[in-house]
Image: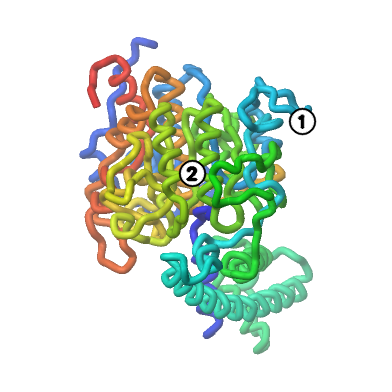
């Protein structure tokens, strides 16, 4: 399933229900500067919010990856070598104004001739491959396990989780429907009062001597709009609509044992049955936006006068559609990884995951295959605030005994944009063994289908930021191996010695307890270390 942050907006609304030059040498950011960095007192501006993941912690007091600083002081006009990044995700809008110039084209394939011109096993795979066909909605893996009955070894655990989540979703939907009604009524009342569709909180606060009904609407509006997140209740209505749609999908598809989303005609439990899917890598409907958002974080065209800038400047995106609205099949994940490796990807981004896996050995073998072929796999940690040292998320690179099958697999947790004790996103998974680094993940502004842009959050957004940093390193230093790039990213990050809240059920603890490195990814320092490693000055 796509790793997007669960909506805290929905939870908060439930309260209402109850109511080459001669310049000086470039130096890495000194650690002592980090620990004395002041906490930012003011909120970020709209422009800062659109690019906060690219900011510098010392200069901006924003826990970004120092991407802007890296371009200004290191990359400058250096173009580097093109890097191919495979985005294994939902469909990608390859015609988006900010992506159309960075989409990979398979030069060995002739478009739309119905032939496998390059003999790679995939017909007309011009920009990648679509393992889902025309399908979109799908069960969760635990729902598929429950459908197999009591003979399956994970049946009891899967069924228990389904039953609990179903009842929670039913209750949430009932409450959200009630809240939606109140918001809609309040919004209609304000539009009538102001005689216009758009209004501000300032105008609401200026209302004098309201009657009882309008007073109730004012109370609701103030509770929601005072956060500054929304301009008016029109935007709130839209978000409530999205939340209700998500809850409805969870009931109708994700947790529904009577639903079957697979339409490709293959046996998803037979890894040798590979004749399925098609070359159409685009989204099947506008709300299928996750892959487009992820691709933009990595590679949106830089400085083209529209939208936003991706992290990497010399990159192409291979689109591999294999994440449905539900849980991905292990077979699709394994074949997608192998497709990416076999067709030249140097980096694979995986912003998806699940906690049940019926054929994890197929995926693990594919991850090992990527490692053996010098391909870096960057994986989102997940969004349930779980310690991954005690509960596995799939895919991962570990055997049942804990041995890692690859030295090119990197797991990323998420940060939010305020430096200090709350800098780790409250939803992010963590683990001193099984999460490697943290990177910006909350409220990340990026591309959405049909030339739109939105901010969403999750470890799904942290992983592609790191994929972009990896692409920068590979572009500038193409002789480095994938394993070296992984180590460079890990070793060059900024160590944070502050206590932060990592496990939301516990008090603040040292940031180092959240990951293997205790560091946040830093593009500026990574490029400096990469240069030293490439010249043999430093050994990893």
Q: Position of residue 374 (x, y in %)?
A: 41, 27
Q: Nearer the viewer, mark 2 or mark 1?
A: 1
Residue drawn at x 59%, y 69% is 257
x, y percentage for residue 301?
Answer: 60, 31
Q: Is residue 17 above or below residue 198?
A: below
Of 309 and 476, the residue lying toward us: 476
Which quadrant would residue 524 be assigned to in this image? Answer: top left
Q: Which mark is residue 350?
A: 2
99 lies left or right of 376: right
For label 2, count other residues whose C-alpha is less than 10 Å away and answer few (under 14), some (14-19) or many (20+).
Answer: many
Asked if one can make out residue 56 in the rendered structure from this viewpoint, the answer is no
Q: How far is mark 2 from mark 1, CA to CA?
A: 29 Å
Which residue: 65% across, 59% down? 261
Residue 114 has which mark? 1
Labels 2 and 1: the sequence-earlier one: 1
Q: Position of residue 225 (x, y in %)?
A: 57, 68
Crowdedness near tag 1: few (<14), some (14–19) or many (≥20) residues, C-alpha within 10 Å: few
Mark 1 lies on a secondary structure that is: loop
Q: Which mark is residue 187?
A: none
> Residue at horizontal 30%, vertical 17%?
24
* Circle 2: element type: strand
Q: Is residue 432 above or below residue 219?
A: above
Q: Quadrant of the C terminus?
A: top left
* Residue 472 appears left or right of 452: left
Give 24 or 278, whichever is nearer the viewer. Answer: 278
Q: Is residue 310 above or below residue 198?
A: above
């Amino acid at each position: 399933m796509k790793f997007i942050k669960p909506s805290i907006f929905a939870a908060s609304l439930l309260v209402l229900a109850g109511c080459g030059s001669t310049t000086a040498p470039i130096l890495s950011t000194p650690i002592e500067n980090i620990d004395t960095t002041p906490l930012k007192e003011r909120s970020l501006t709209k422009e800062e919010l659109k690019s906060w993941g690219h900011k510098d912690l010392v200069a901006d007091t924003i826990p970004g990856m120092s991407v802007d600083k890296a371009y200004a002081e290191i990359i400058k006009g250096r173009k580097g070598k093109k890097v191919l990044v495979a985005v294994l995700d939902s469909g990608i809008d390859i015609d988006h104004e900010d992506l159309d110039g960075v989409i990979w084209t398979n030069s060995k394939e002739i478009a739309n001739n119905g032939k496998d011109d390059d003999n790679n096993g995939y017909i007309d795979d011009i920009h990648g491959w679509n393992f889902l066909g025309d399908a979109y909605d799908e069960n969760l893996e635990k729902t598929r396990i429950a459908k197999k009955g009591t003979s399956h070894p994970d049946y009891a655990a899967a069924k228990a989780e389904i039953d609990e989540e179903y009842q929670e979703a039913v209750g949430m939907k009932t409450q959200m429907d009630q809240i939606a009604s109140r918001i809609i009524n309040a919004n209609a009342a304000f539009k009538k009062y102001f005689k216009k569709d758009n209004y501000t909180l300032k105008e609401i606060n200026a209302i004098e001597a309201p009657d009882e009904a309008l007073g109730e609407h004012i109370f609701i509006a103030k509770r929601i709009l005072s956060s500054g997140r929304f301009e008016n209740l029109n935007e709130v209505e839209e978000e409530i609509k999205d939340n209700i749609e998500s809850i409805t999908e969870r009931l109708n598809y994700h947790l529904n044992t009577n639903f079957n989303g697979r339409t490709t005609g293959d046996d998803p439990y037979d890894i040798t049955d590979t004749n399925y899917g098609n070359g159409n890598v685009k989204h099947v409907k506008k709300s299928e936006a996750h892959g487009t958002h992820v691709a933009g974080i990595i590679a949106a065209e830089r400085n083209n006068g529209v939208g936003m800038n991706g992290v990497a400047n010399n990159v192409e995106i291979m689109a591999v559609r294999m994440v449905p609205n539900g849980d991905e099949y292990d077979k699709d994940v394994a074949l997608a990884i192998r497709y990416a490796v076999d067709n030249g990807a140097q980096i694979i981004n995986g912003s998806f995951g699940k906690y049940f896996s019926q054929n994890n050995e197929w995926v693990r073998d594919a991850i090992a295959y990527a490692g053996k072929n010098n391909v870096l796999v960057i994986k989102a940690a997940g969004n349930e605030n779980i310690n991954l040292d005690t509960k596995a998320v799939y895919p991962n690179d570990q055997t049942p005994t804990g041995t890692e099958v690859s030295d090119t697999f990197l797991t990323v947790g998420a940060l939010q944009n305020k430096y200090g004790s709350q800098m780790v996103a409250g939803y992010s998974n963590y683990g001193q063994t099984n999460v490697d680094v943290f990177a910006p993940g909350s409220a990340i502004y990026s591309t959405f289908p049909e030339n739109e842009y939105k901010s969403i959050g999750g470890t799904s957004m942290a992983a592609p930021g790191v994929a972009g940093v990896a692409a920068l390193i590979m572009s500038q230093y193409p002789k480095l191996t994938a394993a070296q790039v992984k180590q460079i990213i890990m070793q060059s990050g900024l160590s944070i010695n502050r206590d932060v809240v990592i496990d939301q059920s516990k008090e603040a603890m040292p940031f180092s307890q959240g990951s293997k490195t205790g560091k946040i990814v830093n593009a500026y320092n990574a490029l400096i270390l990469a240069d030293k490693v490439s010249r043999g000055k430093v050994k990893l």
